[in-house]
Amino acid sequence: MSAPFSREEFEARLHAEGARYHIHHPFNVRMNNGQLTPQQIRGWVLNRFYYQVSIPIKDAAMLSNCPDRSVRREWIKRILDHDGYGDDSGGIEAWIQLGEAAGIARPEITSLKHVVPGVRFAVDAYVNFARTRPWQETVCASLTELFAPKIHEQRLANWPQHYPWIDSRGLSYFRNRLSEARRDVAHGLTITLDYFNTRPLQEQALEILRFKLNVLWSMLDAIDLAYPDEARTPAEVAGG
């Protein structure tokens, strides 16, 4: 049996999987470059909402499999971040406000009727993974958050310039996730480095992270097919 990677090398290999992150997907590249129409932006917001509302369900499934009270006490913050608590309306509400800022009525967002089958299938696969796999594997799958701050930074920097028709007050979701994702990934990374401590387990962890990266990539594949560039019309280019 091969010797385990050192902790430093294992972490480096996890970070290297960022080459597969959906920040590199052609749809996201076009989004970042200001090349999407309003219809495409709205389609992305509507479909990504299914992922947003499923994340706390995924996290609750992970907690139901976790006997470690200290882990549960920390992980539950993720559910509260999305669902909200006290005076904080949470990330799901922030995403609805993003949709409203992009010109989508709240009932259109929350109905989920615009979610395309490929997005639903990918997200459901992730939730089912959390329900059926050991909790440490779900923690590992969450490590796509290693790469999330960059994508949020890009949207905050570029959307006001490229998509001025979107009310900038609707971008609060991206601002909030900058700090939340960094906090979450520090916890998840420590658990992953501690638990996956043999070469077979480390190789498994890399495969788990690739699975989650594939979930995110597949979502954009499905959205890209549902909202093709051919949909551009003069009115859409102008923001109509």
Image (tube, grey):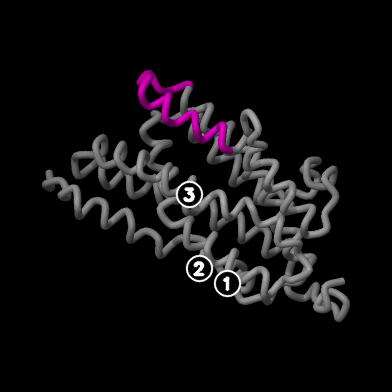
Q: What residue type is labelled 2?
A: His
* CA distance separating discs 2 and 3: 22 Å
Q: Give the labeled residue for mark 1.
A: 29
Mark sitting earlier along the chain (1/2)? 2
Task: Name the spot of residue 21 as percent of width and height, x first.
Answer: 47, 60
Q: Which mark is residue 179?
A: 3
Q: What residue type is labelled 1?
A: Val
Task: Name the spot of residue 91 as percent of width and height, x first.
Answer: 62, 42
Task: Name the spot of residue 73 as percent of width and height, x first.
Answer: 42, 24
* CA distance separating discs 3 and 1: 23 Å
Q: Say which of marks 3 and 1 sits in front.
A: 3
Question: Is residue 226 left or right of 106 when viewed as pictured?
Answer: left
| On screen, residue 174 above or below 199 | below
Mark sitting earlier along the chain (3/1)? 1
Asked which secondary structure carries label 1, the reply is helix
Going 68% across and 75% down the picture, which residue do you hit? 162
Q: Say which of marks 2 and 3 sits in front.
A: 3
Q: Quadrant of residue 86?
A: top right
Residue 59 is a magenta residue: no
Which quadrant is the C terminus positioned in?
bottom right
Q: What residue type is labelled 3?
A: Ser
Q: Quick one: label 1, few (<14), some, or many (20+) residues within 10 Å?
A: some
Asked which secondary structure carries label 3, the reply is helix
Which quadrant is the N terminus positioned in?
top left
Q: Give the range drawn in magenta.
A: 64-81
Going 59% across and 55% down the picture, which residue do you hit? 174
Asked which secondary structure carries label 2, the reply is helix
Mark sitting earlier along the chain (2/3)? 2
